[in-house]
Amino acid sequence: MKEKLIRYFSNITTLTPAEINMLTSGMEVKHFDAGNYVVKAGQVHQNTYFVLEGLLRQFNNQDGNEITTHFYGKEDWIMSLAPFNQPNFATENLVCVKSCSLVIGDETKAQAIFKEYPRLETVARAVMEKVFASQQQRMQTFLTNTPEQRYLNLLATKPDLLQEVPQYQIASYLGITAESLSRIRKRIAQKK
């Protein structure tokens, strides 16, 4: 399992044997069953997660309704972009849709690693840039794309997701009602 994260980092840069050893020896991998919460809204949340296996849903509650804000699958990063040196309280829930294996990163440990292996800070920065760019892209599509375009993009980029989660959660993620999603799906099916 740990080799999946090493392979991910190796796609960014060539790691030395010492860096690989340090990363794998200090790596915490935790398993969660489907339905288990990794983070609940209101909890102090300082960790970063790398999804080795499984599927997670991020959501918040607004007036008693669950609003799905993200789905995370294999090789996705889950991180807060809030300053690490301040208490960070989760504003959203993170729950396992399917059983998950996650690498759990602790920011305090990461800072100690960066002092000993400064090159790894560059790798971490590259990961954060990728996560930030992905979040920016998602926000941009919400501002510029129609709900049907967002659905078609989801269909093209994450087709398995549509089979693994209930349609009302997909609709919430797309920013529409379940009824609107049904109409979009019907319209698309008629075009084929």
Image (cartoon, rainbow, N blue to C red):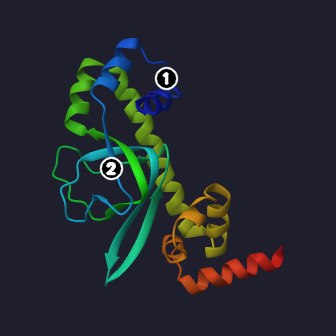
In the image, which is nearer the foreground, mark 1 or mark 2?
1
Task: Tell me the residue at 40%/12% (across/down).
Answer: 17
Residue denoted by label 1: 13
Nearer to the camera, 90 or 32: 32
Q: Looking at the picture, how far across and down is residue 10, in whole percent?
A: 49, 25
Q: Quick one: which residue is furthest to the bottom in this view?
A: 179
Q: How many marks?
A: 2
What kind of residue is marked 1? Answer: Thr
Nearer to the camera, 188 or 160: 160
| Mark 2 secondary-structure assignment | loop
Q: Earlier in the sequence, mark 1 or mark 2?
A: 1
Q: Looking at the picture, how far across and down is residue 111, in whole percent?
A: 23, 31
Q: Which mark is residue 29?
A: none
In which quadrant of the rendered image does the N terminus lie?
top left
Residue denoted by label 2: 81
- Dot 1 alpha-carbon crowd within 10 angstroms: few under 14, some 14 to 19, many 20 or more: some
Q: Are marks 1 and 2 in contact (CB under 8 Å)?
A: no
